[in-house]
Image (cartoon, grey):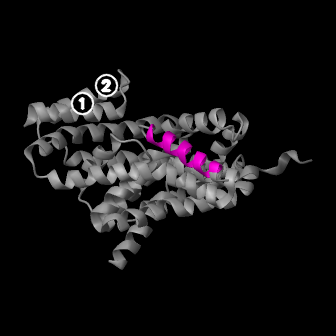
Amino acid sequence: MLRKLWNLFIAFTRASNLGFGGGPALIPLIRVEAVDRYQWLDNQEFADSIAICNALPGPIATKLAAFIGYKIAGWMGAAVAIIGAVSPTLIIVVLLGSLTMKYSNSLEFKAMIEAVRPVVVVLVAEAAYDMGKDAFPTGSSWAIAVITIAVLFLTNIHPAIIILAAMLIGWVLYGRIKNESSQ
Amino acid sequence: MLTQLWDLLIAFARASNLGFGGGPAVIPLIKVEVVERYHWLTNAEFTDALAVVNALPGPILTKLGGYVGYKEAGWLGVFVANIGVILPTALAVILLAGFLMKYSNSPALKGMLKGVRPVVVVLIAQTALQMGVGSFPNLTTWGIALAAAVALVWLKWHPALIILGSMAFGLLVLR
């Protein structure tokens, strides 16, 4: 049991800390650990777990760690896998963050920051574009987008409300199947 | 202090649990909490934080939770922000796994996700615009943005590489 917990911790630490670029980058790395190296799941089970996790919000690494950890070693397994996925990252971030805060007034730092800000804008804009390619399959998708823009621009409504409303609309428009075929 | 910890928990739990669509989808939500609602960072500081953490591995929520949490309340803040990010999601996955195995392909769920995707795209685009407002003080920055776009889309450079590259450029050229 201890061995299993240790393996879970190591596997998720390794995967998480080579995953540059966020969520999707981590999936193949976790697969290597969970399917190839430790055989905790087979390929089909791994694919199913991705599908399940995609139906829920939250970071994919956390969800997969919870799911696989729980499957292998119950609650302790889930806890240990999550800690592995998260702690090394956190330590690095905090160290870097405190360095940032300490030197934020140096000329060098300000120069680096000035150069990097446009890059961040480009990266985020590209994320919108990338997601946008698959997000407008029908005319009503565009309508939803336009309404969102209007609401954001004209009101102070929290994006969370817009998200929940869109999910409701999505369910009403696309999610209900009429039972004509059950004759 | 206690209120602050509670706020951190709630803010990051909210952002984390409405983030449908993976990594980038949570960025606007975190921004609403951290910049607009709680004023823990300014718009510019948020852009900077995003830059720093994008060069690092790991889930974006964890990293931003760590950064903001530490800034506000030291290691306790880090811990609490990440509890908000992790706990509801982990519990949901474990408790609902059986249920979801049956329904993850349901038309209802697919319909909901299809409905929310355009909203997420709009939110992310809006975030890019908001961050853009303070990020282009001179012509050089536009040049950097152009170079970054080329590197990202045509040369397919890894984002971390582009970020480090631009920082090096800034150090050498802009100082």
Q: What stretch is highlighted in magenta?
A: A3-18
Mark 1 or mark 2, earlier in chain: 2
Q: Is residue A7 found inside the magenta-colored segment of the image?
A: yes
For image coordinates 70% across by 55% down, the residue present is: B97
Q: Which amino acid does label 2 sit on?
A: Ala
Q: Can residue B61 be seen in this view?
A: no
Q: In which quarter of the image is the N terminus of chain B?
A: bottom left
Would residue B50 appear left or right of B92 to someone viewing this image? left
Q: Which mark is residue A72?
A: none
Q: Nearer the viewer, residue B96 or A100?
A: A100
Q: Which amino acid does label 1 sit on?
A: Gly
Q: How far apart are marks 1 and 2 (CA)?
A: 10 Å
- Report x, y in % for residue A63: 58, 51
> Seen from this angle, which residue lies furthest front?
A2
Residue B53 higher or lower than B168, as above or below: below
Residue hosting label 1: B165
Task: Verify CB contact (< 8 Å) between mark 1 and mark 2.
Answer: yes
- Report x, y in % for residue B80: 42, 67
Q: Which quarter of the figure has residue B155?
A: top left
> Seen from this angle, which residue lies furthest bottom?
B2
Q: Is mark 2 on a helix, strand or loop?
A: helix
Q: How would you classify the magenta stretch by its main secondary structure? A: helix
- Badge 1 density bin: few <14, some 14–19, many ≥20, Cα 10 Å: some
Counting every numbered tag in the picture gives 2
Q: What element carries label 1?
A: helix
Residue hosting label 2: B151
